[in-house]
Image: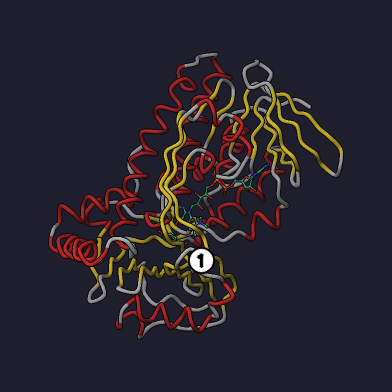
Amino acid sequence: MKADVAIIGAGPAGLMLGHKLVQAGIDVLLIERQSPDYVLSRIRAGVLEQVTVDLLDELELGDRLHREGLPHHGFNLADGERLIRIDLEELTSRCVTVYGQTEVTHDLMAEAPRRGLSIVYEANDVVLLDLESETPGVRYLKDGAEHIVRARFVVGCDGFHGPSRQAIAKTGKAYERVYPFGWLGLLADVPPCNEELIYANHERGFALASMRSPTRSRYYIQVALNEKLEDWPDERIWDELALRLGPEAAARITRGPSIEKSIAPLRSFVFEPMRFNNLFLAGDAAHIVPPTGAKGLNLASSDVAYLARGLIQWFKSGRRSGIDSYSETALKRVWKSERFSWSLTSLMHRFPEAGAFGRRMQVAELDYIAGSRAAQTSIAENYVGLPL
Ligand code: RFL
Ligand code: PHB
């Protein structure tokens, strides 16, 4: 089998890149380990920056997003007593869009056959081949039979645990911070407790009130890493949310049965460079942010925007400048989002080792933010997304 570009992983990064390249007349094969249903069942991001919206618009895949997505002009930080509103619109003239990653993935997957984007699902035992040659390849098993696809470039969009970064681990450097807690998420078909998101720092730990639509809520609470889902029946999560989000929000929480619950660990991670010869990395394969800043999916989008531009330039005119500068350009934006996600995580969570002094520092910083337009502007600028 042959393709111009072989992409490993059909998450948002792989699907967006695949569509961008196919739109430019480049022949792509996407290789995904899971089934389509499994990919669509993963509940993840909910907040899209303008970069992601723009990318879907360029692909002419933004219709449903514009119909069903919710523009959010602000969000709130809660410090246990009050809500500090960050007015995105007023401070940056921009906003974010609440539209689930599942919906983005669905829109991209549904359109793939019509646009000639080939996707092999349920491909097992993916191995990357000959990355230093001009015909690198990917070997995989499908229904027990071995296949090899040869391409001019291979792109690893296979997430944090995929084989692409592992294949080149020795050629670069990894930077990592693992946080001593995780997020327990709950999805329920009940109206959200607030029109805008609330990120709460409470004595008992962090909580987030988010949503997918006017009738579907998404909530998270900080939990210790050794917590088990079976110890968290829905009622216990609702009780904890009511305490942590504060009395105002608690009074407006509608409880209901969960339709999904999961625990995810929090981590900051960057692998440099995001390229080895004819292999490029994009999205979670190259970097992870803790979800507090809502940056993960949006970073995948900016990687895709830079890499698509470079690859299209190479295939159309043979110029190498775009692909040669890809890693450096993408990493500049990655590190700024890493910084923001780490700082918001540090501000909003309970760190067991930080003690009473650490807690006072958080309270003082939240009080400073509440009274400073400059501090609010800095948060708003990062939250809506830095320019490409
Ligand atoms: P993905 O989505 O992990 O997709 C990788 C794909 O590669 C496949 N794969 C393989 N395929 C073939 N062979 C193999 N050996 C393979 N190994 C893996 C996988 O099956 C999968 O289909 O990475 P991608 O495309 O880079 O996208 C990244 C985003 O998914 C991620 O950054 C976001 O979900 C992060 N995130 C958020 N990002 C935001 O921008 N805004 C948010 O509000 C937000 N909230 C979140 C989040 C992530 C969360 N979790 C669960 C970590 C909230 C949570 C709770
Ligand atoms: C979500 O709705 O899943 C969500 C929203 C904001 C975040 C993280 C997750 O920062």
From the top left corner, tell me how far across and down residue 26 is, in percent.
Answer: 64, 27
Q: Looking at the image, is 265 positioned above or below residue 171? A: below
Amino acid type of the residue tagged 1 in the rendering: Asn
Residue closer to the observer: 236 or 257: 236
- Label 1: how many Cα within 10 Å (few below 14, some 14–19, many 20+): few
Q: Quadrant of residue 164?
A: top right
Q: Is residue 139 left or right of residue 320?
A: right
Q: How is the image coloured?
A: secondary structure
Q: Is residue 343 left or right of residue 1?
A: left
Q: Quadrant of residue 363?
A: bottom left
Ligand 1 within 8 angstroms of badge 1 C-beta: no
Q: Secondary structure at mark 1?
A: loop
Residue closer to the observer: 204 or 313: 204
From the top left corner, tell me how far across and down residue 365 is, in percent.
Answer: 18, 60
Q: Quadrant of residue 294?
A: bottom left
Q: Residue furthest top?
A: 318
Q: What residue do we see at 37% from left, 37% from top?
A: 333
Q: What residue do we see at 39% from left, 77% from top?
A: 193
From the top left corner, tell me how far across and down residue 296 is, in percent.
Answer: 46, 49
Q: Looking at the image, is 279 positioned above or below residue 81? A: above
Q: What residue do we see at 71% from left, 53% from top?
A: 36
Q: How many marks?
A: 1
Residue matched to label 1:
226
Q: Quadrant of the C terminus?
A: top left
From the top left corner, tell me how far across and down residue 202 is, in percent.
Answer: 30, 72
Q: Quadrant of the N terminus?
A: top right
